[in-house]
């Protein structure tokens, strides 16, 4: 098993960089009231790698995730996605990348209560006007253990099941990168462990890049990269 882990790391080190930053910052105010949510940060993430951003509440980890995921303009610096300077692209080009290349998982699930589990999962496909074989969706939901819940509504599911639906929705559009912001924040320890194990396993199985924000140490054993952030300053551990 150790040999397999080492081989996986070597393979990923050889992969090209899929997303990177160059002295990217996020600040508010000016002069004496200037506040840095994120100090100048340069990092790179390889395709197919598992990456953890670890920090306490208010440390700036969600700000960093938002900048990487194209959800918040930086104050200075650059974010590169596959050799494209993301925030130099126009709004339509940015939206196209977010819709087709990025998948998002949040702490509060963000499921639509009025529609079924199945419709929640395929919502990104409908928004982006993409067709996908229904058998692929069924395979994904069976792996996640919610294949028998497709006709149910979110309120009929447990928290762990709802987060699995959110994972399926994030992956339904076949994105290259999954961004997860405190995905286990509303789950008990047992469910949190199961959800994380499934998420990492799916990313490895389907060669997805995972960038996950958490305040929980050792949430993922031996990630390919572990970034620690405190007071908006990032260190690679």
Image: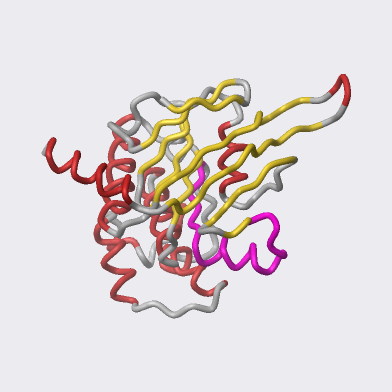
Which residue is nearer to you in this view: 227 or 98?
A: 227
Q: Is residue 39 left or right of residue 33?
A: left
Q: What secondary structure is the magenta-colored segment mainly?
A: helix
Q: Which residues are magenta?
A: 86-107
Q: Is residue 73 left or right of residue 177?
A: right
Residue 158: say if magenta.
Answer: no
**Place of residue 48 in the rendered image (x, y in percent of width and height, measured from the top left):** 35, 52
Q: Quadrant of the C terminus?
A: top left
Which residue is nearer to you in this view: 34 or 186?
A: 34
Which quadrant would residue 226 be assigned to in this image? top left
Which residue is nearer to you in this view: 198 or 212?
A: 212
Total labels: the figure holds 0
Which quadrant would residue 118 be assigned to in this image? bottom left
Q: Is residue 28 above or below residue 71?
A: above
Q: Residue furthest right?
A: 31
- Taking the spot 56% from the left edge, 21% from the top edge, the residue there is 230
Residue 100: say if magenta.
Answer: yes
**Place of residue 75 in the rendered image (x, y in percent of width and height, measured from the top left):** 75, 40
- Taking the spot 65% from the left edge, 39% from the top edge, the residue there is 24
**Place of residue 11 in the rendered image (x, y in percent of width and height, measured from the top left):** 26, 49
Q: Is residue 118 above or below residue 159?
A: below
């Amino acid at each position: 098993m150790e040999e397999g882990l080492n081989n996986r790391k070597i393979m990923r080190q050889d992969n090209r960089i899929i997303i990177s930053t160059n002295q990217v910052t996020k600040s508010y105010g000016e002069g004496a009231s200037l506040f840095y949510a994120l100090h100048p940060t340069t990092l790179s993430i390889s395709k197919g790698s598992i990456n953890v951003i670890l920090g306490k509440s208010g440390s700036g980890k969600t700000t960093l995730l938002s900048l990487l995921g194209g959800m918040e303009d930086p104050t200075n610096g650059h974010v590169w996605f596959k050799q494209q300077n993301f925030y130099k692209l126009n709004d339509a080009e940015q939206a196209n990348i977010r819709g087709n290349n990025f998948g998002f998982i949040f702490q509060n699930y963000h499921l639509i209560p009025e529609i079924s589990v199945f419709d929640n999962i395929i919502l990104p496909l409908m928004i982006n006007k993409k067709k996908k074989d229904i058998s692929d969706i069924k395979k994904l939901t069976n792996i996640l253990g919610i294949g028998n819940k497709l006709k149910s509504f979110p309120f009929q599911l447990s928290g762990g099941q709802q987060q699995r639906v959110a994972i399926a929705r994030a992956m339904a559009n076949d994105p290259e990168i999954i961004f997860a912001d405190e995905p286990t924040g509303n789950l008990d320890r047992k469910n949190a462990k199961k959800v994380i194990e499934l998420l990492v396993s799916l990313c490895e199985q389907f060669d997805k890049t995972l960038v996950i924000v958490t305040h929980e140490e050792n949430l993922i054993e031996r990630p390919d990269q572990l970034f620690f952030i405190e007071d908006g300053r990032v260190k690679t551990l």
